[in-house]
Amino acid sequence: MGYFFLSCKSSKFEVFVLILLLGSSALGSAKTFQGESCSSVADTCSSFVNYQYPYDLRLQQIANWFSVDPVALFGANNFNLTAAPDPENEIIPGNQTLRIPVTCSCIGQIHRVNSTVYTVKPDDTLSKIADSIYGGLITYQEIAAVNNIADPNKILPGQQFVIPFPCACLNKTYNGHPVISLAYVVSPGDTLSKIAAKAGAQAADISKLNALNNSLLIVGDVLDIPIPACSSSFTTTATDYGLIVASGSYQITADNCVQCSCGSNSTDLYCSPAPALLSGSCPNLHCDGTKLAIGDVKEQALSKSCNVTSCIYEGFQGKTIFSRIHTAEQNTCPAPMHAPLYVPISSAPSSLPPVSAPPPPRPPSPSLQGTAGAPLPTTGAQTPGGPSGPSAPPPSFGFLRHESSDFLVMVATLVCFFSLWF
Ligand SMILES: *[C@@H]1O[C@H](CO)[C@@H](O)[C@H](O)[C@H]1NC(C)=O
Ligand SMILES: *[C@@H]1O[C@H](CO)[C@@H](O)[C@H](O)[C@H]1NC(C)=O
Ligand SMILES: *[C@@H]1O[C@H](CO)[C@@H](O)[C@H](O)[C@H]1NC(C)=O
Ligand SMILES: *[C@@H]1O[C@H](CO)[C@@H](O)[C@H](O)[C@H]1NC(C)=O
Ligand SMILES: *[C@@H]1O[C@H](CO)[C@@H](O)[C@H](O)[C@H]1NC(C)=O
Ligand SMILES: *[C@@H]1O[C@H](CO)[C@@H](O)[C@H](O)[C@H]1NC(C)=O
Ligand SMILES: *[C@@H]1O[C@H](CO)[C@@H](O)[C@H](O)[C@H]1NC(C)=O
């Protein structure tokens, strides 16, 4: 910004430009969330990025783009696994909002995602990757910086880049409640209360965390949203010790044997045996010496109270499942505990061929490989009109995030030119 003051010699116009620039900050370009600061590489956590793609996609495609497990995607979005024996082949309708679970790491003293790796395809440009595939969550400059790409115009098919989304761990709590952070890109029509309702978070928390201070939301800005979560109190030696599950989602743990859910308005983690289709051979999931499996509750009505016995999951280590029996006398018998209701994958009509139809053969493409490098079965899952299709939105080189401030800078530049002219 200082540049414009230097290049404008006329004091009258300096004042004008100053007013314009002040105007822009009064309009409140909310500071775009660029990742929470951090001091130790040990400071990692699970977090989410919010994601929307304009065309129908097979879930496997999204799982590839973000290097995540399809089952974890199901859990993060509370989809019914029992209803989808083949999660990777489910079709996500265009524009459906998804929570993508990622691992938030500490890279160069900033929290950023290190778990998403993209493999460059022929025809890719860095800005197409940033804007068309990752939907404004990241700029091509940020990808170039973290991957030490000297010339962003020269990337080669087969190269692999970390896509360093901004993220936060928030010490796993906000305002004294357990939370998981969600990186959210402001879209047209968003208001603070709409975003809060969509994410299941408190508007006041979002405002405070992002220092919004009543400023206008700007389309393309990224916000850090603290989603309430259910924390666990597992045995300290458990492999999944410290598990925290966002409200309105579940996680599969204990080698696919246990599902831990957090209701959309709940703070109580509820763990029960995972759907049978996931769990090949699971250890005994019953509490010692009882007929109760983890998650089961037995109620015994007494004359003036209710004796409630439950079998509670407390983590796993190797093939050992930790659990304990909890008995409490309550005034009344509670409603039976069960996992929170699932969210249906929207049943919008799809332009993709039916899941049962074999995909058309395609030459193997390096970008359609899983994180482990193993080719995936859904090689043909590319949508017509997808990122490599003819109707992909044109790359927009970095303008996406700060359209309004870029516009103000343009106006200021014009003013300067006129000031020098006269
Ligand atoms: C999940 O899907 C199965 C199979 O379609 C169905 O029987 C079950 O009721 C569903 N569960 C919920 C909670 O919607
Ligand atoms: C998704 O939203 C965009 C922008 O509003 C729109 O152009 C596109 O048609 C939508 N796609 C679907 C599948 O509804
Ligand atoms: C990021 O991931 C790479 C491997 O993909 C690893 O070598 C590196 O240590 C990771 N960095 C951090 C800060 O976790
Ligand atoms: C994080 O939380 C722990 C306890 O939950 C607390 O001891 C620690 O001071 C917190 N750290 C920061 C940086 O807030
Ligand atoms: C928030 O806005 C008020 C009035 O609009 C202003 O006085 C205050 O300094 C602002 N605070 C921050 C942190 O920007
Ligand atoms: C969530 O809980 C709060 C307070 O306990 C309540 O006011 C609100 O109506 C609940 N929302 C839903 C969707 O159940
Ligand atoms: C409550 O249930 C437990 C376990 O079934 C049993 O050991 C205990 O005696 C019961 N208490 C009462 C008051 O019936």
Image (cartoon, rainbow, N blue to C red):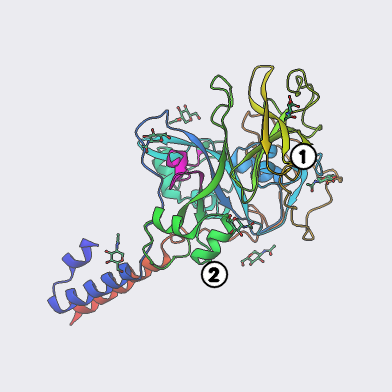
Question: Which numbered circle lies on residue 303?
Answer: 1
Can residue 149 be seen from the camera position used here? no
Is residue 188 left or right of 306 when viewed as pictured? left
Q: Vertically, is 12 above or below 194? A: below
Q: Pointers 2 and 1 in contact (CB under 8 A)?
A: no
- Image coordinates of residue 195 in percent, x first then y, are 54, 61
User: CA separation, marks 2 and 1?
Assistant: 56 Å
Which of pointers 2 and 1 indicates the residue nearer the eye?
A: 1
Residue occupying the point 21% across, 61% down: 2
Q: Is mark 2 within 8 Å of ligand 2?
A: no
**Secondary structure state at the residue bearing disc 1:** loop
Farthest-out residue, bottom: 422
**What residue did someone put label 2 on?**
189
- Image coordinates of residue 36 in percent, x first then y, are 39, 44
Location of the C terminus by quadrant is bottom left
In the image, 349 versus 191, the foreground residue is 191
Q: Which residues are magenta?
A: 162-181
The quadrant of the picture showing ligand 6 is: bottom right
Is residue 52 left or right of 408 when viewed as pictured? right
Does 322 lie within the magenta span? Answer: no
Dot 1 amino acid type: Ser
Residue occupying the point 74% across, 42% down: 333
Location of the N terminus by quadrant is bottom left
Q: How many marks?
A: 2
